[in-house]
């Protein structure tokens, strides 16, 4: 390892910080981008380098061999006093196309003042002989997207549009914790830096081992770019990183799923035939390891083990793993482009009938999510009625890496519900119905004795809490569903559902402008009617809060802080409606409403993209005083005959 590398890429605390790429102009059709032209560029790689290897795998899989030529560099670096690559494998020890001996010549031709390491992959423009791109992180994406016109017939889609956000998230994790993580350990210059990197790598390998127990590849049964990025590190781990980078807790061959997965990929065209394990051993033990003064290259391991059967093509992963969550815009859009919400699957009512569910204290567990208004109303009603002891509760959320599998117990230790011991809400759905094909939604009421979802009927669940669970309510519980108003409340709730509660989703998921405009008109017409109604009455049905108020509140609370993101031109914000906005604040004063409304979570950024063009709430979520805004004074009391009492009690 050169002294320059030690000086420039090691921080004061001994941590390795990889140099930035200098030549990052993207390929494309816009002004200033590199033109996509067959025969114009030459890709330089070394079989030893994982960053370059993945570019070569993608080039092979997509059939770009005729469009982009390939130059191969010796895996053993030349002894020239700099970190360089040489063409000593070629005749006359020079690249047969560019007639250069060292890769550095193409770098310095592009920038005579270049001071960094001369890295691969490097794309050289044959018209100029200059390096034009060495952006290993994004290069494969250019091959996959911008170079599509040159893909071979039947080329795989390694970067499918519907998975790109999830692939990008996982690729970022793989870079920091696996691809570059091994280098952080191997090039660490302090015990603390090494220890941190060591744990980072193995914690993520353990996580990947678990994930690959549920699907053949990282995103199901098709290879994606993420698999290529993981593979190139796995291929080098046992022969180089395990000893050379002191990552000696476990071999990849010690992990049943990771090792089978690696061999599965190795046998695929483009993977094994571009993997030179002997070259990898030579490079890392002669060039990258500083503790090998005599230049000894290990004889083992027996590399034939890469060709042993893996059996992953015969495993039915759906029977043992998590199903990928269906997407609304794929499964719930009609021929007009309108969003048609899936029906609830578990709708058995609570009651006295032979087949009805029976209300019992301690038997049921409610799962809900901070962002979901359908489940939020169940959590509010549970607290209003004092059912905390009768019905246990837990929150679900979504992790960046596992969002494809739906709701997960991200707030719990080991990401598992402490009562039922499951990681995903879907496990409880499939316990109840192994053939269930819909989205696994919240609210979900689970029978803890059977570990099965028994009710996910968001439309009626609060009514069951209000009636069937009456014996378990607190002595001073409010009557949110008065018997004399039930018909009116039901009718009003039936109107709220399509126009307001689901109206926002009809706009957000609409796939035609006609469907969007219909939902838009329905939603704002409904708000105008509600605004008029609330000019005369404190709450929807008079002086007291009812079930309908809970249903309306949860949608209103999310509109200005979240829903607006996915809508077109906004006609009005909620704060623009004088009566509705005062009504919202009046309800927010009630502890059960405030305690179950997580504005910062609702308003949190929807992606990690830190570009300039972020919506207002994403940029300022941690600076906005939601509590202060929603606690501002209002004058709603003057509309009530019982200004200090917002609830009808059972003994009123």
Image: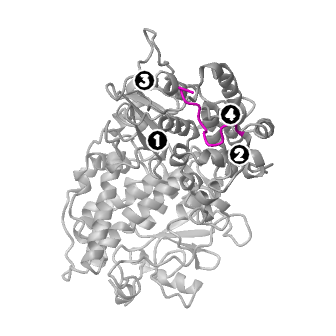
User: Residue placed at 43% from the left, 60% from the top?
Assistant: 173
Image quadrant where one finds the N terminus: bottom left
- Whether the residues at callouts 3 and 2 have beta carbons within 8 Å, the answer is no
Q: Which residue is identified by label 1?
A: 407
Q: Where is residue 520 in the image (x, y as percent from the top left)?
A: 78, 40
Query: Eyeballing the image, is 235 above or below 513?
Result: below
Question: Closer to us: mark 3 or mark 4?
Answer: 3
In this rendering, position of residue 358 left or right of residue 580: left
Task: Please tell me whether mark 3 sits on a helix, a strand or a loop.
Answer: helix
Q: Report the residue marked by disc 3.
A: 471
Residue 636 tag number:
2
Q: Marks 4 and 2: which is nearer the front? A: 2
State whether residue 442 appears in this view. no
The front one of 568 and 579 is 579
Quarter of the image holding residue 335? top right
Looking at the rendered image, the quarter that the C terminus falls into is top right
Going from the N terminus, do you reach mark 3 or mark 2 first? Answer: 3
Structural distance between the alpha carbons of marks 1 and 4:
21 Å
326 relative to 278 in the view: left or right: right
The boundaries of the magenta stretch are 640-652
Looking at the image, tell me whether mark 1 or mark 2 is earlier in sequence order.
1
Q: Is residue 244 magenta?
A: no
């Amino acid at each position: 390892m050169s002294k320059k590398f030690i000086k420039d890429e090691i921080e004061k605390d001994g941590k390795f910080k990889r140099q930035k790429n200098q030549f990052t102009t993207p390929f494309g059709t816009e002004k200033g981008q590199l033109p996509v032209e067959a025969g114009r560029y030459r890709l330089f790689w070394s079989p030893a380098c994982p960053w370059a290897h993945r570019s070569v795998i993608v080039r092979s899989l997509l059939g770009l061999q005729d469009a982009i030529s390939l130059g191969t560099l010796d895996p053993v670096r030349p002894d020239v006093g700099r970190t360089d690559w040489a063409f000593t494998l070629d005749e006359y020890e020079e690249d047969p196309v560019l007639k250069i001996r060292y890769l550095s010549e193409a770098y310095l031709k592009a920038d005579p003042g270049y001071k960094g390491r001369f890295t691969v992959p490097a794309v050289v423009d044959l018209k100029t002989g200059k390096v034009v791109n060495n952006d290993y992180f994004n290069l494969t994406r250019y091959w996959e997207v911008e170079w599509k016109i040159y893909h071979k017939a039947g080329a795989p889609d390694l970067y499918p549009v519907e998975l790109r956000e999830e692939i990008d998230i996982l690729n970022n994790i793989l870079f920091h914790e696996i691809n570059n993580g091994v280098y952080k350990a191997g090039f660490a210059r302090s015990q603390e830096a090494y220890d941190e990197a060591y744990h980072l790598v193995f914690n993520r390998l353990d996580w990947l081992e678990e994930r690959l127990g549920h699907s053949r590849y990282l995103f199901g049964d098709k290879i994606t770019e993420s698999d290529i990025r993981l593979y190139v590190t796995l291929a080098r781990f046992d022969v180089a990183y395990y000893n050379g980078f002191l990552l000696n807790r476990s071999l990849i061959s010690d992990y049943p799923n990771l090792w089978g997965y690696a061999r599965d990929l190795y046998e695929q065209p483009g993977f094994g035939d571009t993997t030179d394990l002997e070259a990898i051993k030579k490079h890392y033990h002669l060039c990258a390891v500083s503790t090998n003064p005599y230049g000894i290259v290990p004889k083992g391991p027996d590399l034939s083990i890469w060709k042993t059967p893996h059996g992953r093509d015969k495993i039915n992963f759906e029977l043992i793993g998590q199903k990928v969550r269906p997407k609304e815009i794929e499964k719930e859009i009609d021929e007009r482009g309108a969003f048609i919400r899936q029906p609830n699957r578990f709708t058995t009512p609570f009651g006295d009938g032979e087949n009805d569910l029976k209300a019992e204290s301690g038997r049921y567990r409610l799962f809900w999510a901070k962002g979901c208004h359908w489940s939020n109303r169940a959590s509010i009603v549970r607290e209003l009625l004092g059912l905390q002891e009768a019905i246990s509760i837990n929150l679900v959320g979504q992790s960046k890496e596992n969002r494809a599998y739906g709701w997960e117990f991200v707030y719990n230790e080991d990401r598992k519900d402490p009562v039922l011991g499951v990681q995903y809400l879907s496990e409880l759905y499939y316990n109840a119905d192994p053939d269930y094909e819909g989205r696994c939604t919240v609210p979900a009421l689970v029978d803890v004795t059977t570990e099965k979802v028994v009710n996910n009927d968001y439309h009626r669940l609060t009514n069951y809490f209000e009636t069937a669970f009456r014996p378990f309510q607190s002595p001073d519980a409010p009557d949110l569903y008065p018997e004399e108003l039930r018909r009116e409340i039901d009718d009003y709730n039936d109107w709220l559902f399509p126009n307001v509660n689901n109206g926002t989703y009809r706009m957000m998921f609409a796939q035609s402008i006609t469907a969007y405009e219909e939902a838009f008109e329905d939603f704002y017409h409904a708000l105008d009617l509600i605004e008029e109604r609330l000019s005369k009455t404190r709450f929807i049905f008079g002086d007291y809060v009812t079930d309908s108020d809970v249903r309306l509140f949860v949608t209103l609370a999310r509109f200005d802080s979240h829903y607006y993101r996915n809508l077109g031109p906004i006609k009005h914000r909620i704060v623009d409606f004088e009566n509705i906005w005062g009504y919202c604040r009046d309800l927010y004063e009630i502890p059960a409403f405030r305690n179950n409304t997580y504005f910062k979570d609702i308003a949190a950024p929807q992606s990690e993209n830190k570009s300039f063009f972020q919506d207002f709430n994403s940029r300022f979520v941690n600076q906005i005083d939601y509590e202060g805004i929603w606690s501002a004074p209002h004058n709603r009391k003057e509309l009530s005959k019982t200004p200090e009492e917002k609830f009808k009690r059972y003994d009123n």
